Amino acid sequence: MGELKDTMKGLGNEVAGNAKQAAGEARNDPAQKAEGKAQERKGELQQGVGKVKGALGDRV
């Protein structure tokens, strides 16, 4: 169950991060671009945690 939750949260953060990066690019706002990049990386990490939980099954 945790696998799906982490994967979906990660995907959401990745999408939101990409949107922030695009908005920062459009507004020429380096701080917003950096915030978006950080959120995208957080999402990628969360998805990785979900994959590990899936591989380990109920042992986590």
Image (cartoon, rainbow, N blue to C red):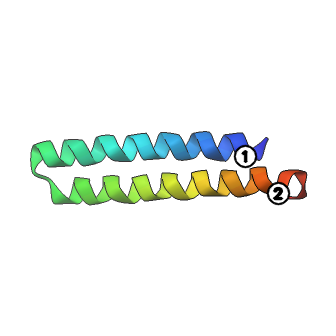
Where does the C terminus fall, quadrant-wise? bottom right
Between 21 and 57, which is closer to the camera in this rendering? 57
Work out which residue is located at the far left of the displayed protein and give it: 28
Q: Is residue 5 left or right of residue 16?
A: right
Label number found at residue 20: none
Q: Residue at 24% across / 53% down in the picture?
A: 32
Amino acid at dot 2: Leu
Query: Residue 42 location in percent, x, y?
Result: 49, 57
Work out which residue is located at the far front of the displayed protein and give it: 55
Q: Are marks 2 and 1 in contact (CB under 8 Å)?
A: no
Q: Residue at 23% across / 43% down in the picture?
A: 22
Where does the N terminus fall, quadrant-wise? top right
Query: Residue 51 location in percent, x, y?
Result: 68, 52
Work out which residue is located at the far right of the displayed protein and give it: 59
Tell me which numbered mark, 2 or 1, is placed earlier along the sequence: 1
Residue 26 sits in which quadrant?
top left
Of circles 2 and 1, the one toward us is 2
Residue, disc 2: 56
Query: Residue 47 location in percent, x, y?
Result: 59, 51
Residue 5 sits in which quadrant?
top right
Residue, disc 1: 3
Q: Residue at 41% across / 54% down in the picture?
A: 39
Q: Residue at 85% across / 51% down in the picture?
A: 57
Q: Is residue 13 above or below residue 31?
A: above
SS for tag 1?
A: helix
SS for tag 2?
A: helix
